[in-house]
Image (cartoon, helix red, strand yellow):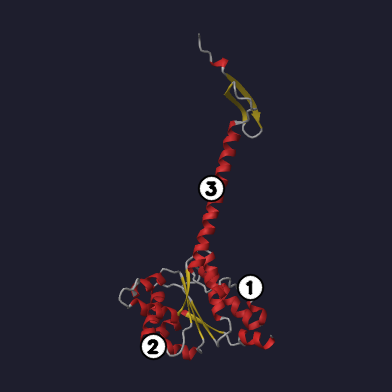
Amino acid sequence: MSFDPKHWSNSHEGVCEKHGSWQVTLPASVTRVPTCPKCRDEEREARAAEERRVEEEQERLEHIKRLVRLVRAPPRFANAEFDGFGDAGAAQSRIATIVRNYANAVANQTGGGRWLVLVGPPGTGKTHLGIAAALAVAREQRRALYLRLPDLLAALRASYAKGATESEAEILDDIAKNFLVVVDEVMDGLSDHGQRVLFELIDNRYARNLPLIIATNCTRLEFEAVIGDRAADRVAEQASYLSCNWTSYRRRRRETS
């Protein structure tokens, strides 16, 4: 029996508004109405591109979630934002705008390694602003870290113990990996060890021209005395001081409750 392709295939042709004339040969068993093969190829490519886009977007969002967790924001400040911070007055609004703009510049790498030092009494929102900046930078896919200086010093003391799982160098190296570091609770009465650790952190940021935010309840003069001459000299060159001298939010809530 002779084999004739015409017995098992059909030829189809047509005209596509986009690609012009086309012709395809399909098995006789295929009952669907054929369309322009170039259009079908483009549709497949578009579906594949959309699937890649969705997958990449999901990966981006997961990456941002991971970076936000790595900020290590305390639960109370896990959702700290700039919006609404200035509702209490013009001074708060002005400082919040400066810190927001700073965070945007850091995220876009246009800040030139400048620093901020937030000074003022307790309860004025310095921690909130520092964490809001770190979270904003993390959401732009740059690694940021919030840390309290007393917690860091406690972790370093624990690293000196026999059997410690981390060394001082490893802890400080982990901090150095962050693009932005926010150091909170730089207080009066800092020990020689604390002053040395803080200087190393500040000097590392200075040498690598990386951004830094420091929050303290001290005045500017008290802060410079606390951190020592070497660190204060670097801060004076790199930092802008922002004064948060308004009524404590916690006191205001108690007085109005």
Name the amino acid, label 1.
Asp
In three-dimensional space, the C-alpha distance between marks 1 and 3, rounded to whole angstroms, equals 34 Å
Q: Earlier in the sequence, mark 1 or mark 3?
A: 3
- Residue 52's tag is 3
Q: Amino acid at mark 3?
A: Arg
Indicate which label's residue lies in the foreground, 2 or 3.
2
Note whether 187 is above or below 76 in the view shown.
below
Q: Is residue 91 above or below residue 56?
A: below
- What amino acid type should be assigned to the residue bearing mark 2? Ser
Give above or below for 112 relative to 243.
above
**Residue at the disc numbered 1:** 83
Distance Cα–Cα, label 2 vs label 1: 37 Å
Q: Mark 1 or mark 2, which is nearer the start of the sequence?
A: 1
Q: CA distance from mark 2 to mark 3?
A: 54 Å
Assign a secondary structure to mark 2.
loop
Marks 2,1: beta carbons within 8 A? no
Question: In the current view of this chain or complex, which residue is farthest to the top?
Answer: 1
**Image location (x, y in percent) of residue 170:** 35, 71
Q: Which element type, helix, strand or loop, lies under badge 1?
A: loop
Q: Who comes first in sequence, dot 2 or dot 3?
A: 3
* Residue ID at (53%, 51%): 55
- Residue beneath the point at 59% across and 39% down: 43
List the single residue furthest toward the front. Answer: 163
Q: Are marks 1 and 3 in contact (CB under 8 Å)?
A: no
Residue extending furthest toward the left: 162
Answer yes or no: is residue 102 visible.
no
Q: Residues within 10 Å of mark 2 (few under 14, many from 20)?
A: few
Q: Nearer the viewer, residue 81 or 103?
A: 81
Q: In the rendering, which numbered label is found on residue 191? A: 2
